[in-house]
Every structure is written in structure tokens, then in C-alpha cells.
Amino acid sequence: MDRNPIRYLNDGISQHPHVDENGGVPRLAFPTPSRRAVFHARAHRDPAELPGEGYPVVLNTGRLQHHWHTLTKTGRIKTLDRLHPSPFVEIHPHDATTLGISDGDIVEIASRRGTAELPALVSDRVKRGSCFAPFHWNDTHGPGLTINAVTNDAVDPDSLQPEFKVSAVALRPTGRTVADSMPEKQKEALGDIAILWTSQTGNAETAAVSVHRLLHTAGISATITAMDECDPADLVDVNTAVMIASSFGEGGPPDNGARFWAALAGDTKPLNHMRYAVLGFGDRAYADFCGHAKALDARLRELGASPVLGRVDGEATDRTLVASWTADLLDAIGDGASAIVETARRLRSEGLPVAAPERFTRDAPILAALSHNEILSASNSGKEVRRIEFDLTGHDVSYSAGDALGIYPTNREEDVQRWLATTGFDAQLPVTIDGGEVPLATALANHYDICRVTEDLLHFIAERRRDKHSVKLLQGRDTQAREVWLRGRNALDVIREFPIRAAIEEWQQVLIRLTPRQYSISSSPLVSPQAISLTVSIVRYQGPDGSPRGGVGSTFLADRAQHLPVPIFLQRSPHFRPPSTSDTPMIMIGPGTGIAPFRGFLQERRALGHTGANWLFFGDQHRTEHFYYRDELDGFLRDGSLRRLDLAFSRDQAKRIYVQHRMMEQGAQLWRWLNEGAHLYVCGDASRMAKDVDSALLTIAQKHGKLSGEQALEFRKELVAEKRYVRDVY
């Protein structure tokens, strides 16, 4: 095994690799005649300590999914710290009720060896008669937090591994709660200046953290919290609210801001005392660009709050926007102190502070080879769906089931040449990109989205042509006629049909940047640690002149990515994970390429030996053409990894049937699963499918749960709050 020689006094080799008879060095070899691992059967042995009189509960200890041991490294990662900020003991609801314990109560865990006192987390993820406490926290974090003061001393006679998984304990409520243990100032969720963020993929959160850090640098104290962790009523003590919001789908709130928005839009007390600022993030491909930020701004005005500066909208990747907006915010809420003035000046002149980016992130992608490119759809299909796979060998990076992979695509060479021919510019014309100079052709290929039609582009063209036909079509009130005309056309078609002359600097102002495309990962690292699979629908169509057109990202993967290393990065999705407990049921709804993450979920649960039942709703247009991963799904069914598979192929019969119809057909069973603690996952189209599935869920709650419409909405809110209803929709 190779080891880093910096860490060791020897030559960095602890064991010389095995060389086979052909001179090859296999990646893994065991000291057996076959060089394969051998499992040795051992007789069952009861735990050294079983529950009994005085100590009736089994204590199980271990680590949390993303943390290691004593938090010396992972405890410094703020994202993980927010995910698991403090220790806890997890107790089954039945046991909690019997003992009179509620969420947040401080519980004494006592054994024959010692005691610990931890906050209760009431959850059905543990079995009745058992409890779980992570071992990461100890007395250096606070008195009475060391769970290993309770565990037994038994060890395996051969390996000497301690038996921390089974200890007999007694649980007793202390009469105190977490709130009682917190200093008074920590009870206040929001401060005089409060930063509230809502984000679907993490971009708005990243911006909020940057703004919070910059305010601190300028000497301004502020709190920061996600919108789903507070209520509009909490704003009563806030003097200045800084709202940083992404939009989801067609201008709606992200999942972790939906409850806050519903309350704010409802019967909320006036906020005449409060000032506010809104920074919105969105995708210009959507008609209601930054729609949720606009809605927040309008509602805060209605409630009497006063803006300290005008709302600013932009793309999430625009670091310059965040820097300039934060500088304006400092000017607006600051008192002119030198630290505030200097911080604002630096932001305007130097932009956001740039720290060394972590590898395999948006700012530091790795270059990976495309190792697999397989068509999943039938050859006669009108749709083209592929399994794309990237090789991670040699990169020392990891991923989790449920994450997304970001791809930096390039434009087709023929599209770059069409743009140059239409505008009349020289391919070698030097232009400035990100502070450096490159030929125009390179900028068009790698940095600008020259195919996407935006409102700014249409306005730019109409303003320079000024003839009635152009203005009426490109900027007129008849948006339906314009949408019909734009079908099958991209930006290259528009500038060819409405040619204009403008300086290259003007074009650079109107062209949007070529942003990375993100795709749900359709594999598990437990099965494919050195490869990442994607399930991609390739967008192809004909232009008005009959020539081929296509989606920039999907055709890049299908046609061009195999010829060069591709910059890729990981977009972690900590909210979108298969259940961590073995026996939790799971319902997955993923039609079309929405099946992608659920292939990874099923691989993961099978590899872990999880026993929880899994149910998949899948469908597409035709069974014979679009039954992706059919053989694999059949295999999951045969070995029990998949309990149920409900299919909806919409065009195989006269009346179209979709996944939401299958949900309704199985409503009683689906309601029973949810009542038994099942987690519900949805992946795929946000514009129609996700809404229809959500509507079906509410209908099932009313019909089979005998809930009123209002109670069904509250039930859904509870599922979201418990992270049992999570979506990856786009």
C-alpha cells in the first residue's frame, strides 16, 4: 500500500505490492492462494451485556454519516456543523411517550459504568427498546456529553475491537430542556440585522455566508439563518432584514423557503418598523427571472417595510454582482466608520475575497475522461437518452448517491463560425474575459452562451433595428405569437433573421455566460467508487432552415466530450439522500430521466444490506422504447431490493397515463407506507410532473387519510419539515 512519505519516517511503502506471473500489479490482492478475499464463518456470540432489570434499553453508538470520530477535522466544516450542530440521543416515539420525554428534553443515559446527559431526538429511525447516540462529542464540548462514559468495556478477543454497539442503559428525563441549557442571547433566532436565505441548490446560501462574513469584517454584527428555520413573526425584533433568495421552477420559492413564504404571504402583522434589502438569484432561461425575489420585495413593501436599496437580480454564478451589491448594502446600513468604508471600497475595486477553492467544486473542477456513452432508448425512438459515465481514477475525489454532477460544456465549432459570419467579426479579435485576453472565437466557444434566446437579446436587437416588424415581433405584447415564432429557433437564428451591427463590447454586455449544466448522478459510490454515471436526455431538433440544432450541454456530452478531458465538479445535495436507517421504507417517483438518482439509491441500499421496502414509480412514452435500466430494475425486483415497481407509459394506450395516475390508483397503499414512516422522493420535470405529483399527494391524504384540504396541506408541510418529502426537480 502506498502512503504519503511526508507522514512517515520510512520510504512510504508499508507493504510491497503483489506482482503476478505476467508481471502485472493488480489494484487489490489478498495473501491467499487465489489472491481473493476469503470470508471465514464464525459462531454467533451474544453481546457481553444485554438489557434487563434496572437497565432495560439497548444503547447503540457510532458515527454520523458525514463526521469522523472526535470532529477534529469534520467539525471545522460549517456546512456539516449546521447539519449536526450538537449531540443527541435518538429515542423511539413509543419509548419517549412511556418515559414522558419530548424532543429537546435533556435525558440522562445511565449504565453500570457511568452517565451522560444529551438532548432527546424522538424518531422512528430507531427500534423500540433501543436508542442511538453518536460518539463525536465529549467533555471538551461540554460536561456530561461523553457517551463512551456509558458504553461497556467488552472487546473482541482477536481484533480487540470494542463492543460499542450494544450496552444496557436506563433513560431518565432530567426535567430540563435544550432551551433551558442555552444562554439567553441564543434563544433569539434573529438579531437587529438579520440575513435570511433560501436556496434550492446552495448558491443563495453560499452568497449569504459571504455577505455575513463581509459584514463581520466591516464591524457590523448580523445573524444568518435559513428561512425555514424562522417565522415572519420573528421579524418583530429585526431592524434590517437582508433577504437573499433563489427562485425555484417558474418563480416559486425553494423548498426550504416555502413555509416562510406561505406565512409571509398570509395574515402577517405590519412590518413598518423594518428596513430590508433583497438580492435575487435565478436563471434567465425562465420567463419569471428571479420571480421569488420579486415576490418577497413586493410583499415586504405591502407590509410597510422600507427598502434600504433597490432589489438586485442576477445569475447565481455572478461574483461581481454579489460584491457590488454588498458594497451598496454597507453604504446603506453603515454609519460611515472607516472599516465599513474600506470594506466597501475593496469590494468595488477587488471583488469578493478569493480563497483557495476546494477541488471538485464549481470553482476548481477536475478534468475527467468520458469512459462510457451508451444509448438507452430504442433506435426507432423519437427521444434520445444516454448513460454517460466519467472515470474518476487517479483524482482522489468522492461523491454520494443523490448528488449532482456539473459539466462545463463548449459550443459547437460550426455554431461559433455561424455567429462570427452573421456579426462580421474576426475570429482572432482579442477580447477581455475574466481579466485576461483571448481570441473572440475562443471566448465564443468556451465562455458565452451564443445559442440561448434571452429577453435582453431580443430587446438589444429590436432597439437597434427600430422597424415596426422587428419591434412588434421581438418586443410586442403578443408574447404567444413570439413564442410560436421562436419554436425551433435559437439565438443564432434570431440574429441571422434580424442582423444588426454593434461593437463587440456591446455584444459582450448582452451575451450571457456559458454556465455549467448539472445532471443528477445515477450511480452509488459503494458500487462505482471510481466512476460517476449520468442519465441524460439529448435535446435535438431542426432549425427553420432544416439544419440540426441541439441543447448545448446534452449534445456536448453525446457528440464531443469523448474527444477531450471534460471539466466536471460535484454539486452536493445533502438534502437528497436515501434513508440512513436500514429499515425505513422509501417511495421514489422518477419518470423519464428522473429515474437517474433512484438507480443510485437502489444500488446503495442493496450494497448496505438495508431491509427497508423500496417502491418506484417510473414511466415515459412507450414501454418498448423508453424502459430505461429495465434489466437492472428486474434484478432489483428479483433480489428484493425493490419491493414494488409501478409503470406508466403514457402513449401505449388511447388515454394517456402518467405517474400521478398510478399514485392515485395505489393511494391506499401509498398512504399506509407514509404512515409507516416512508420517505417520499421526486425527481424530474418541475413545470408539470412535480406539480401533478404534489397534487396527487394532497388528494391521497384527503381521500385515504380522511383529512380536510387544510389538514392535507399541513400534513405535506410536516413531511417537508421532517425531510421525508424531498425533491430534485428542474
Image (cartoon, grey):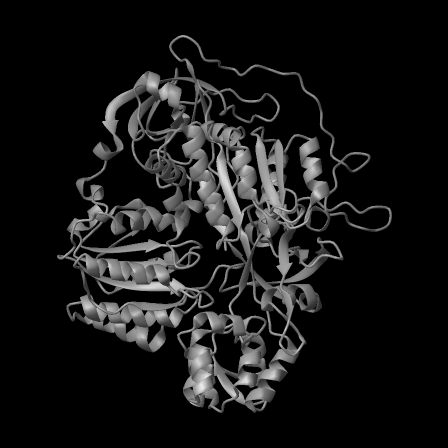
Nearest the viewer among 375 and 205 is 375
Nearest the viewer among 552 and 2 is 552
Tell me the residue at 46%/39% (across/down): 697
Nearest the viewer among 90 and 403 is 403
Left or right placement of residue 101 versus residue 249 in this view: left
Left or right placement of residue 522 versus residue 173 in this view: right
How far across and how far down the image is residue 628, in percent?
68, 48
Where, by quadrant of the figure, is residue 102 drawn? top left
Nearest the viewer among 208 and 686 is 686
Q: How many marks?
A: 0
Vertical placement of residue 512 versus 229, above or below? below
Vertical placement of residue 602 versus 457, above or below? above
Where, by quadrant of the figure, is residue 634 drawn? top right
- Can you see residue 97? yes
Q: Residue furthest left?
A: 273
Q: Residue furthest right?
A: 21
How far across and how far down the image is residue 151, in percent?
43, 23
Q: Residue furthest top?
A: 53
How far across and how far down the image is residue 686, in percent?
49, 53
How far across and how far down the image is residue 182, in percent?
23, 37
- Can you see residue 339? no
Tell me the residue at 44%/55% (across/down): 201
